[in-house]
C-alpha cells in the first residue's frame, strides 16, 4: 500500500490522501478539497487537478472517496471529484445529526435532506469497505464532531482531525454536538493499536518547523501535548474545554459547513445564474 499526501500549503494546511496499491492500481481518496479564494469569492479546482494528475499518471482506479467528517475550515471536493471520476462518496452515518443542526443554522429550505442521501454510503463503526485489493475498516471516533470517522487501511490509520501530530495535539471540541469526553474515548480507542501503527493526520500547523503529516500510535501515546497516555479523562476534558473557550472560529466556517453538509456540492445558481452562500449574522 502506498500513500501520497497533497497539502493545501499555507491556506488551510489540509491533507488529502491518495491511497493505492501500485500492483493492482486500486485506489481510494480521503478528504479531497475544493479551493475557495475569499478575496473574489471564487472556487477553483487547483488542488483537485493536482490529485487527478497523480491518479492519471499512475493509471489508478479510484473505488471510493471518503470524508473523515464535515470539515469546518475548507470545502470538501468530494462532489466535484465524483463528477470527474464517477467514484462513490462515503462519510460517517452521524452526518445526519450534523445536517439537522446546520439546516436550522442556515435556515435551509424544507426540501434540504437531512438523511445523508447526498452521499452514496453512510458508514457505521466496524464497517469494512473493499476497494479492489484495498480493505478499509471504519472506526467511529466522535468528539470533534459526532460524525468523525477514522479509516484503518493496512497498518495505517487516517484520523482526520481527531488526532494530530504530537506537538499539535488533538482536535477542538467546541462545535455543535462536539464533546471532549467523546474525543478522549475515541483517541484512547486508537491507542489500543500497536505502537508501530502509522497515523496520517488531517492537518499540520508547523509553527517554525518543517511540515509533517505522519506519526505513530507509539509517538502519540508518549508525547501528544493534549492527550499523552498518562492523562486521565477528567483532566483532559477540563484542559480541552479551557483551551477551546479561547479559540477563534475557523475563517471559512460558514462556507465550509453550508457546503459540506451537502457533500461539497455548490448551491444551485439563482435566476441571474449566480450561486450564493448564506452567512448568519451574529450567530456566534
Image (spheres, helix red, strand yellow):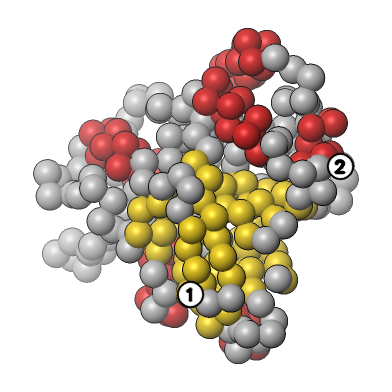
Residue at the far right: name it. 209
Q: Secondary structure at mark 2?
A: loop
Please give the residue where the numbered disc 1 appears in the rendered image: 63
Residue 37 in view (yes/no): no
Picture mark count: 2
Image coords of residue 248 (percent x, y)? 56, 27
Which residue sits at x=22%, y=68%?
Answer: 273
Q: Is residue 252 above or below residue 10?
A: above
Picture quadrant of residue 271: bottom left
State how far apart marks 2 and 1 are (Cα).
38 Å
Q: Nearer the viewer, mark 2 or mark 1?
A: 1
Image coords of residue 5 (percent x, y)? 69, 64
Left or right of 221: which side holds 108?
A: left
Q: Secondary structure at mark 1?
A: strand
In which quadrant is the N terminus drawn? Answer: bottom right
Discs 2, 1 touching: Cβ within 8 Å: no
Mark 2 Cα-neighbour bin, 10 Å: few <14, some 14–19, many ≥20: few
Lower position in the chain sequence, tag 2 or tag 1: 1
Image coords of residue 74 (percent x, y)? 51, 51
Residue 284 in view (yes/no): yes
Q: Is residue 153 above or below residue 190?
A: below
Toward the viewer: 7 or 170?
Answer: 170
Toward the viewer: 268 or 262?
Answer: 262
**Image disc number at residue 208:** 2
Which residue sits at x=48%, y=48%?
Answer: 126
Which residue sits at x=68%, y=11%?
Answer: 235
Left or right of 31: which side holds 120?
A: left
Amino acid at each position: 500500500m502506498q500513500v501520497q499526501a497533497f497539502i493545501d500549503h499555507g491556506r488551510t494546511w489540509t491533507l488529502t490522501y491518495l491511497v493505492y496499491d501500485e500492483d493492482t492500481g486500486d485506489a481510494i481518496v480521503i478528504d479531497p478539497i475544493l479551493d475557495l479564494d475569499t478575496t473574489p469569492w471564487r472556487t477553483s479546482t487547483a488542488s483537485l487537478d493536482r490529485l487527478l494528475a497523480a491518479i492519471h499518471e499512475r493509471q489508478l482506479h479510484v473505488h471510493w472517496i471518503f470524508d473523515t467528517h464535515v470539515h469546518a475550515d475548507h470545502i470538501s471536493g468530494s462532489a466535484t471529484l465524483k463528477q470527474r471520476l464517477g467514484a462513490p462518496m462515503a462519510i460517517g452515518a452521524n452526518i445526519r445529526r450534523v445536517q439537522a443542526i446546520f439546516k436550522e443554522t442556515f435556515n435551509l429550505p424544507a426540501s434540504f435532506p437531512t438523511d445523508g442521501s447526498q452521499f452514496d454510503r453512510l458508514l457505521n463503526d466496524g464497517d469494512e469497505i473493499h476497494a479492489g485489493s484495498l480493505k478499509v475498516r471504519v472506526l467511529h471516533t466522535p468528539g470533534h464532531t459526532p460524525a468523525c470517522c477514522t479509516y484503518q487501511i493496512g497498518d495505517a490509520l487516517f484520523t482526520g482531525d481527531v488526532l494530530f501530530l504530537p506537538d499539535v495535539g488533538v482536535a477542538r471540541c467546541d462545535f455543535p454536538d462536539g464533546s471532549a469526553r467523546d474525543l478522549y474515548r475515541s483517541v484512547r480507542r486508537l491507542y489500543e493499536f500497536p505502537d508501530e501503527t502509522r497515523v496520517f493526520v488531517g492537518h499540520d500547523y508547523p509553527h517554525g518547523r518543517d511540515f509533517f503529516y505522519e506519526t505513530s500510535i507509539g509517538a502519540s501515546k508518549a508525547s501528544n501535548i493534549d492527550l499523552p497516555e498518562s492523562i486521565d479523562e477528567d483532566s483532559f476534558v477540563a484542559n480541552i474545554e479551557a483551551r477551546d473557550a479561547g479559540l477563534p472560529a475557523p475563517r471559512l466556517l460558514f462556507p465550509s459547513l453550508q457546503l459540506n453538509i451537502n457533500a461539497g456540492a455548490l448551491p444551485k445558481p439563482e435566476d441571474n445564474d449566480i450561486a450564493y452562500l448564506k452567512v448568519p449574522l451574529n450567530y456566534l
